[in-house]
Image (cartoon, coloured by chain):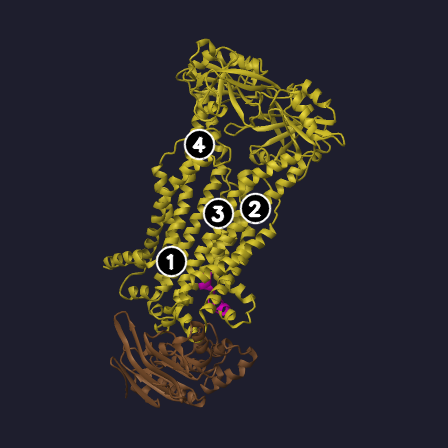
């Protein structure tokens, strides 16, 4: 019977009840939804393109026979092709080709054009020359992304690096492979041009109709050595999505933080509104509205606010995604998806999900105030002076402590499917627990702070101290913002400090020279090594070879680094962490990066089986080292051992120690003159350090913006709740004006209260932020990216941040409380309590 | 018309409208030093507005308010505020004692606002609380007081800084008959002890009976009752 009345009440509340705080809540939820939806759209479209590209590289293959490291002898091709399960076999030489003067590599596919036609019929389209171009060893076909990247057209020339020599290839047409830059050429030409005679990297297979892929894979694997694996093409596609999953999940969590802030603002504004309109709710109850009807009304009111924010957020999110794609590309600057230009598409299911998420966040935020309003005894609530008791119900020391303990426990739990799910849950529980504990924490902090001597400051302080639960509602958004901002600041500072220390350790030489740097086509030959060692001013050179090693289907390859190293003192070259082991005679020592150790579950003393030189080799983990350069993991072994096992005499990188007094710049110039232009990259350690730190600062620049945004949201919350509380206390301010308190002094009182609240928020927020920063450092970052770091607190930045927060909070309180200084406040003494 | 030097307060030709509604018109009134004046009238006739004009909390549309020889309409907001702080006291219908301060702290508030050192306020507060019969409740929270007790705290606060003029707006409006009578007796005794003048607005003849003089405010102006 109450429903028609409640509907009118509902409309009234929506229309007039919330004012500025309602708008603020809508804006915060819209922001959270927009970020989440935008990240979803951008990543979904980028991953789709990547998967399509990965899938298209293997054409219509049912299975792929893949070398795990450095390719395989082409004599395996007839072995595979003659198997009864195989209908068509197409050998491929897939190389990461070095483009002189560029850091990024070009993926180059050497293909048997006749075999490929059966599996990849669409590959060689678009050429206007004769058909024999496809067989000529100096012809190359570019896909659209590589043509744009290299700025090359049909008939033009592309220069790639082979060893330290340059190979000129004529562009004969286009290859229809979507996604990142890819080029294709005849396999024999590729083998000859890039020093890979007799080598292939994989064989794409189409099976005889009616034969199951799984059974065929098992049958084929039984005739192949361990260094060659048979896998389904989907595993390669899955790598593309898995590659950036942690990055995407972390971005999504940032969006959830914004959504959380929105929910918190809804909680704060709803709690204030519930208390302000307490007697009205009590009247409804007295008139016969049931408890659950009242609670439902309030939750629905908030859900409507959230749904409005959700719908606006979805629209904003689409626009944001389009703008981000235009400005930064689909990887948002993280270099995961180079060279693809996907088209954004509306995802209706996701749009509805994110809009509902906004409504759910707001409804959850309103749940506690709604239940309080429903639970309140009407007789008591109809009378004035019951506010603090109502406010006190929003906090519970036991519930808060329980949430914090649960958060602490969650922080120790392992990742779920490689993601720090419990880490995020721990942060959420700690934030919510601290907010639930806020009335109690506020009371404790106010009790510890000394009462100011000046009458007005003392009056401000006494007012806050007497109503800690009310104060904590103003504090909640600010505490959460400060905690998040401080945690991010400590995490970024720790990361930067650790990166600087790491760079100091890994760059001991005077000059660094690189040929290819991880690519397959550029390398130092033994002649080039001899030339480098004999350069004037060079005292000593250490060479290193890096090759990609595939260890697990569905995971990107790790880098195997073969370098000169003293097994008795590996710490001289590697930033080891934790214990090390000196392997026994006959054992192959391996030092794994912590990323690799995390991804593959390796520990010191454990054994690893590596594909080297076409066979599986067993080594012992002799130590774990910190590596910020290779996000997919790395394994270091002695170069001599690698040479013996693989027969690979090549090197990609060289570290040069110069004789005292030698100018590194002069040596770099002499090197550049000795080899073809662009074949070598030289860098001084200071330069590498500066570039690395600049890249770091650019990558994390967004976090400073986010920290600023977090504080802005917190201050907006403070402003909204301050305005509401000043409205509720205007008779008090009116009375003070009667007693002779000037407008300026009222402003001063409000500023004092703002500053005091900020002080309490800083004390609680900084402690909470410190704990969260430890979870970010030791749990979330470690489980997401597998990088460890040493905590480093940016004291000066935090002090400046604290001072700025206090000043801004004081100013915010003063501005928000202007109504307390108006004539209406003076006249409000006539209003009854 | 010139102000009489014996008058503490003189209103001349005072007028105030709110929008199209003319509330006060051509009000003339004098209050002598030490005089207890009651202004009676129906609800909505402008009694509280009259008090606000006297206190300088609102500006008249016409006329003048002269307090201790100073024309209030010529003072700025800060000067008026300081005048209220030093020379006036207020008693409200709803008491308006601060719930987060003790009884003694509420009474000390005007003294501290007037710059009296904290250590000197104790004696004066004790003296006032004794005078209003709350000597033993100095450290109680005001939330623990009854309505009559709260109003006695408000009277002590209004007189703490020895104002020349006390303005009371329906001081017994929220009290029962017994408590109201006690408060009115107290108000009269205390103001007489301090030789303070009182302007009390009320619609209650019983309350007005405690005054030296009673005037009636109607839509046509002020008349002697």
Chain ID at mark 2: A
Per the rendering, the colour in which chain A appears is yellow
Magenta stretch: helix, strand or loop mostly: helix
Secondary structure beneath dot 4 equals helix
* Percent of width and height locating residue B149: 41, 81
Asked if disc 3 and disc 4 are in contact, CB closer than 8 Å, the reply is no
Going from N to C along the chain, the mark reached first, 4 or 2, is: 4
Per the rendering, the colour in which chain B appears is brown
Q: Residues within 10 Å of mark 1 (few under 14, many from 20)?
A: many
Q: Residues within 10 Å of mark 2 (few under 14, many from 20)?
A: many
Q: Residues within 10 Å of mark 3 (few under 14, many from 20)?
A: some
Going from N to C along the chain, the mark reached first, 1 or 3, is: 1
Q: Is residue A483 visible?
A: yes
Q: Nearer the viewer, residue A511 or A336?
A: A511
Q: Which range of residues does the magenta coloring cover?
A: A460-472
Q: Is residue A348 above or below residue B37?
A: above
Asked if badge 1 and badge 4 are on a common chain, one would say yes
């Amino acid at each position: 019977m109450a429903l028609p009345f409640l509907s009118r009440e509902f409309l009234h509340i929506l229309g007039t009840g919330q004012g500025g705080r309602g708008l603020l809540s809508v804006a915060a939820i819209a922001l959270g939804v927009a970020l989440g939806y935008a990240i979803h759209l951008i990543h979904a479209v980028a991953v789709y393109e990547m998967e399509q590209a990965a899938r298209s590289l293997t054409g219509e293959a049912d299975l792929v026979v893949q070398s795990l490291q450095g390719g395989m002898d082409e004599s395996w091709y007839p072995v595979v092709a003659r198997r009864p399960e195989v209908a068509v076999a197409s050998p491929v030489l897939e190389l990461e080709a070095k483009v002189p003067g560029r850091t990024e590599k070009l993926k180059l596919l050497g293909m048997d054009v006749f075999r490929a036609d059966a599996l990849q019929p669409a590959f060689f389209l678009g050429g206007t020359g004769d058909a024999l171009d496809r067989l000529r060893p100096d012809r190359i076909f570019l896909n659209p992304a590589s043509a744009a990247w290299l700025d090359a057209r049909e008939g033009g020339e592309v220069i790639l690096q082979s060893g330290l020599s340059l190979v000129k290839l004529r562009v004969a047409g286009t290859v229809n492979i979507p996604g990142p830059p890819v080029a294709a050429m005849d396999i024999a030409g590729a083998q000859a041009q890039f020093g890979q005679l007799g080598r292939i990297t994989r064989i794409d297979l189409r099976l005889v109709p009616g034969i199951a892929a799984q059974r065929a894979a098992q049958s084929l694997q039984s005739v192949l050595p361990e260094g060659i694996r048979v896998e389904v093409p989907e595993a390669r596609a899955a790598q593309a999505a898995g590659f950036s999953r942690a990055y995407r999940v972390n971005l999504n969590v940032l969006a959830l933080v914004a959504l959380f802030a929105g929910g918190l603002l809804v909680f704060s504004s709803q709690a204030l509104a519930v208390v302000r309109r307490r007697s009205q709710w009590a009247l409804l109850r007295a008139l016969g509205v049931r408890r659950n009807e009242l609670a439902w009304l309030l939750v629905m009111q908030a859900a409507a606010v959230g749904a409005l924010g959700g719908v606006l957020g979805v629209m904003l999110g689409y626009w944001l995604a389009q703008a981000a794609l235009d400005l930064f590309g689909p990887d948002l600057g993280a270099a995961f998806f180079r060279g693809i230009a996907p088209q954004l598409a509306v995802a209706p299911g996701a749009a509805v999900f994110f809009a509902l998420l906004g409504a759910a966040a707001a409804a959850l935020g309103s749940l506690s105030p709604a239940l309080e309003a429903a639970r309140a005894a009407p007789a008591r609530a109809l009378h004035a002076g019951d506010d603090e008791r109502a406010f006190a119900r929003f906090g519970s020391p036991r519930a808060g402590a329980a949430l914090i303990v649960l958060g602490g426990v969650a922080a120790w739990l392992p990742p779920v499917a490689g993601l720090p799910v419990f880490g995020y849950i721990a942060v959420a529980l700690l934030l919510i627990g601290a907010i639930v504990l806020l009335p109690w924490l506020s009371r404790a902090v106010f009790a510890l702070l000394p009462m100011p001597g000046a009458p007005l400051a003392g009056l401000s302080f006494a007012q806050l101290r007497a109503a800690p639960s009310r104060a904590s509602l103003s504090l909640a958004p600010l505490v959460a913002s400060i905690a998040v901002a401080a945690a991010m600041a400590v995490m970024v500072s720790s990361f930067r400090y650790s990166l600087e220390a790491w760079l100091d350790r890994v760059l001991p030489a005077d000059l660094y020279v690189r040929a290819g740097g991880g690519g397959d086509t550029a390398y130092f030959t033994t002649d080039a090594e001899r030339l480098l060692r004999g350069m004037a001013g060079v005292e000593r050179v250490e060479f290193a070879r890096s090759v990609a090693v595939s260890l697990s289907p569905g995971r990107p390859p790790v880098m195997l680094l073969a370098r000169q190293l003293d097994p008795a003192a590996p710490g001289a070259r590697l930033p080891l962490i934790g214990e090390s082991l000196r392997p026994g005679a006959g054992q192959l020592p391996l030092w794994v990066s912590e990323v690799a150790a995390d991804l593959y579950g390796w520990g010191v003393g454990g054994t690893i089986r590596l594909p080297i030189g076409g066979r599986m080799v067993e080594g012992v983990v002799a130590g774990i080292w910190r590596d910020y350069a290779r996000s997919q993991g790395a394994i270091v072994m002695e170069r001599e051992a690698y040479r013996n096992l693989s027969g690979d005499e090549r090197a990609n990188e060289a570290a040069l120690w110069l004789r005292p007094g030698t100018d590194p710049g002069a040596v770099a110039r002499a090197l550049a003159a000795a080899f073809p232009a662009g074949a070598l990259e030289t860098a001084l350690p200071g330069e590498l350090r500066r570039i690395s730190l600049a890249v770091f600062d650019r990558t994390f620049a967004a976090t400073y913006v986010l920290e600023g945004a977090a504080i802005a949201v917190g201050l907006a919350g403070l402003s909204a709740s301050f305005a509401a509380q000043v409205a509720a206390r205007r008779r008090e301010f009116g009375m003070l004006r009667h007693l002779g308190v000037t407008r300026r002094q009222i402003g001063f009182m409000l500023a004092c209260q703002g500053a005091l609240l900020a002080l309490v928020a800083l004390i609680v927020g900084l402690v909470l932020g410190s704990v969260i920063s430890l979870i970010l450092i030791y749990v979330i970052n470690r489980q997401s990216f597998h990088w460890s770091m040493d905590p480093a607190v940016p004291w000066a930045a935090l002090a400046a941040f604290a001072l700025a927060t206090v000043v801004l909070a004081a100013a915010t309180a003063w501005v928000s409380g202007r109504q307390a200084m108006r004539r209406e406040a003076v006249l409000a003494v006539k209003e009854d309590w | 018309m010139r102000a009489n030097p014996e008058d503490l307060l003189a209103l001349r030709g005072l007028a105030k409208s709110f929008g199209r509604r003319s509330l006060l018109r051509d009000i003339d009134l004098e209050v002598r030093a030490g005089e207890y004046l009651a202004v009676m009238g129906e609800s909505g006739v402008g009694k509280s507005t009259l008090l606000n004009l006297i206190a300088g909390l609102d500006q008249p549309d016409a006329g003048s308010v002269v307090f201790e020889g100073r024309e209030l309409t010529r003072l700025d907001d800060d000067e008026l505020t300081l005048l209220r702080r030093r020379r006036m006291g207020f008693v409200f219908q709803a008491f308006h004692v601060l719930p987060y301060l003790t009884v003694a702290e509420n009474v000390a508030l005007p003294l501290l606002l007037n710059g009296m050192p904290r250590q000197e306020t104790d004696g004066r507060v004790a003296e006032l609380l004794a005078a209003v019969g709350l000597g033993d409740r100095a450290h109680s929270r005001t939330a623990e007081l009854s309505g009559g007790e709260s109003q006695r705290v408000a009277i002590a606060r209004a007189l703490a800084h020895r104002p020349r003029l006390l303005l009371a707006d329906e001081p017994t409006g929220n009290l029962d008959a017994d408590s109201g009578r006690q408060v009115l007796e107290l108000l009269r005794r205390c103001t007489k002890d301090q030789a303070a003048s009182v302007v009390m607005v009320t619609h209650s003849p019983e309350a007005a009976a405690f005054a030296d003089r009673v005037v009636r405010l109607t839509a046509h102006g002020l008349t002697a009752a």
